[in-house]
């Protein structure tokens, strides 16, 4: 291929992106631009300052358009950008793990999307630049197909699927009941509540309060009303956040191209395509709130996809546990690793669960008893709650701890407040680590860590007797530990 052919291979972003980036940059530089405009009104150069304020975002968008291009060769994908320093980011097509397509409201109005290529590189910044912000939606679908060696997924899949695509899951709006029970939902609700409070304070819009009337109502009643109000607000904001993120969620399996395709989002839509050959297992998250309500969530363990990009591997949002189990079985091709019973870790591990939960609770309870003697006997109730809570936590963590080898998968489960059940293909295990703290060594226990190139790069089986840990590792990957065993 001569230089003229190579030059023609490079493609620019869609020209309509020039309407997207000025709007974004105006929002990003809004405080500075307001200051510039206000300053300009007090000087004779006000008109010029206004032109600068308007022209700066336009110039930045034009520079980004002129300096960004991409191409796909026989075996690589390349993105080049930069005005003063030209950079070319290149990755082998064999390293492409996921392709994310997102569209903000302004992107959707203009028929554009942002395409991000996940390659599993550990460099962080390099992978962030494998993004094409401002290409036409049809071109993005074709590009995704080329990157994953698959046919473009249909924009509208019938309820029962098609000859090649099968609808595995659609969002049930009844699942919003799980939104307030997740940590993410509470964080989103708390952030939104904080912004509202800050806005009221900034604009001095706080309602006036008659303190004399409040005093007549009673302190306990006011506290109860306040707690109920905050709880209701948190729940509503968590539900809104859940819908914004997951509205229209659909999971599609293409049985011919062996890919999994996800679509979700209300204002900003997101589409993710996962290569089935890159999925080495699943992770079922069971936070305490979801578990009490009979729910859980599902993520795929994708080979080469680090923890920073785990949002791309979500297969099921918070949903009923039977739904999560069904989808997990579809992804793995079998039900055994999802529902099989697990082996316990013996009395030493049980004692460690109780010790780690009751010792801190006991120390805090002693401090509460001291406060009860010195300040108020009400602290005795705090001490009682702490002891009961510590005992319940130890009991729940003891019940959760377990492992198994089922149908070629290593299954590990642990945790209470954030319980997790992970199933990892044993061929995806690239190494084993035995880790033990000083307290574990005193108890004769060790953690067995299966290292892998997917997800959090490890699956940990907690608190095993060392002989059981080596036996489990040798059974899961025959021959891998032979050079280290006598």
Image (tube, rainbow, N blue to C red):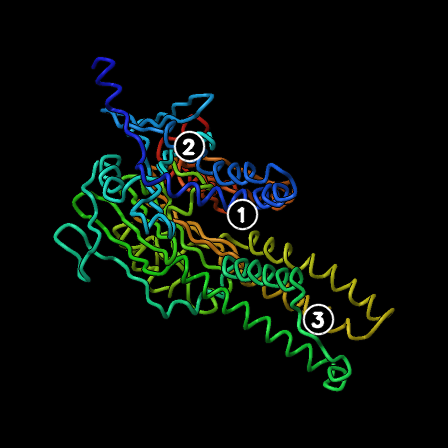
Q: Secondary structure at mark 2?
A: loop
Q: Write the residue at 65% across / 44% down.
A: 439
C-alpha separation, residue under disc 1 versus residue under disc 3: 29 Å
Q: Residue furthest left?
A: 163
Residue 410: x and y in percent read 38, 45
C-alpha separation, residue under disc 2 versus residue under disc 3: 54 Å
Residue 214: x and y in percent read 73, 82
| Disc ID at residue 230 | none
Q: Write the residue at 62% across / 38% down.
A: 44
Q: Write the residue at 35% across / 50% down.
A: 270
Q: Secondary structure at mark 3?
A: helix
Nearer to us in this view, 272 or 418: 272
Mark closest to the chain's N terminus, 2 or 3:
2
Residue 47: x and y in percent read 55, 39
Residue 109 placement, left or right of 231: left
Q: Which residue is mark 3?
A: 384
Residue 161 placement, left or right of 63: left
Mark closest to the chain's N terminus, 1 or 3:
3
Q: Which residue is mark 2?
A: 129
Nearer to us in this view, 374 or 193: 193
Mark 1 against mark 3, which lies toward the viewer?
3
Residue 170: x and y in percent read 29, 61
Q: Residues within 10 Å of mark 2 (few under 14, many from 20)?
A: some
Residue 288 placement, left or right of 421: right
Mark 2 against mark 1, which lies toward the viewer?
2
| Disc ID at residue 463 | 1
Give the quarter of the image for residue 364: bottom right
CB atoms of marks 1 and 3 within 8 Å: no
């Amino acid at each position: 291929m001569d230089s003229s052919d190579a030059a023609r291979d490079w493609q620019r972003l869609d020209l309509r992106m020039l309407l997207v980036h000025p709007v974004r940059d105006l929002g990003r530089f809004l405080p500075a631009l307001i200051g510039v405009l206000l300053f300009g009104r007090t000087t004779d150069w006000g008109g010029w300052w206004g032109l600068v304020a308007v022209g700066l975002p336009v110039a930045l968008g034009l520079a980004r358009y002129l300096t960004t291009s991409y191409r796909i060769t026989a075996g690589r994908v390349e993105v080049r950008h930069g005005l003063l320093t030209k950079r070319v980011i290149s990755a082998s097509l064999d390293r492409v793990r996921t392709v994310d397509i997102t569209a903000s409201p302004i992107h959707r109005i203009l028929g554009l999307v942002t395409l991000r290529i996940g390659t599993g590189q550990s460099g962080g910044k390099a992978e962030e630049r494998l993004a094409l912000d401002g290409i036409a939606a049809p071109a993005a679908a074709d590009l995704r197909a080329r990157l994953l060696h698959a046919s473009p997924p249909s924009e509208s899949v019938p309820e029962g699927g098609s000859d090649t695509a099968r609808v595995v899951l659609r969002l049930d709006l009844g699942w919003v009941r799980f939104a307030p029970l997740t940590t993410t939902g509470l964080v989103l609700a708390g952030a939104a509540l904080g912004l509202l409070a800050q806005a009221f304070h900034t604009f001095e819009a706080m309602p006036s309060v008659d303190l004399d009337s409040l005093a007549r109502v009673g302190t306990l009643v006011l506290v109860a009303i306040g707690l109920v109000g905050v709880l209701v607000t948190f729940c509503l904001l968590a539900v809104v956040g859940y819908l914004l993120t997951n509205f229209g969620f659909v999971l599609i399996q293409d049985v011919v191209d062996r890919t999994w395709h996800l679509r979700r989002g209300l204002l900003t839509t997101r589409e993710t395509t996962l290569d089935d050959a890159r999925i080495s297992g699943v992770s079922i998250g069971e936070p305490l709130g979801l578990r009490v309500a009979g729910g859980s969530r599902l993520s795929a363990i994708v080979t080469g996809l680090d923890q920073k990009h785990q949002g791309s591997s979500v297969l099921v949002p918070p949903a009923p546990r039977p739904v999560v189990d069904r989808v997990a079985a579809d992804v793995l091709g079998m039900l055994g690793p999802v529902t099989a019973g697990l082996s316990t870790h013996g009395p030493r591990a049980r004692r460690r669960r109780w010790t780690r939960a009751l010792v801190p609770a006991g120390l805090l309870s002693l401090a509460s008893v001291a406060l009860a003697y010195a300040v108020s006997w009400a602290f005795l109730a705090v001490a009682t709650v702490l002891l009961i809570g510590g005992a319940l936590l130890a009991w729940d963590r003891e019940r959760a701890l377990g492992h198994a080898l089922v149908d070629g998968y290593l299954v590990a489960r642990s945790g209470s407040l954030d319980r997790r059940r992970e199933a990892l293909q044993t061929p995806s295990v690239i190494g084993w680590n035995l880790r033990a703290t000083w307290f574990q060594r005193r108890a004769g226990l060790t953690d067995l860590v299966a290292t892998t190139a997917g997800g959090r790069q490890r699956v940990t089986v907690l608190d095993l007797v060392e002989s059981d840990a080596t036996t489990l590792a040798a059974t899961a990957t025959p021959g891998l530990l032979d050079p280290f065993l006598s």
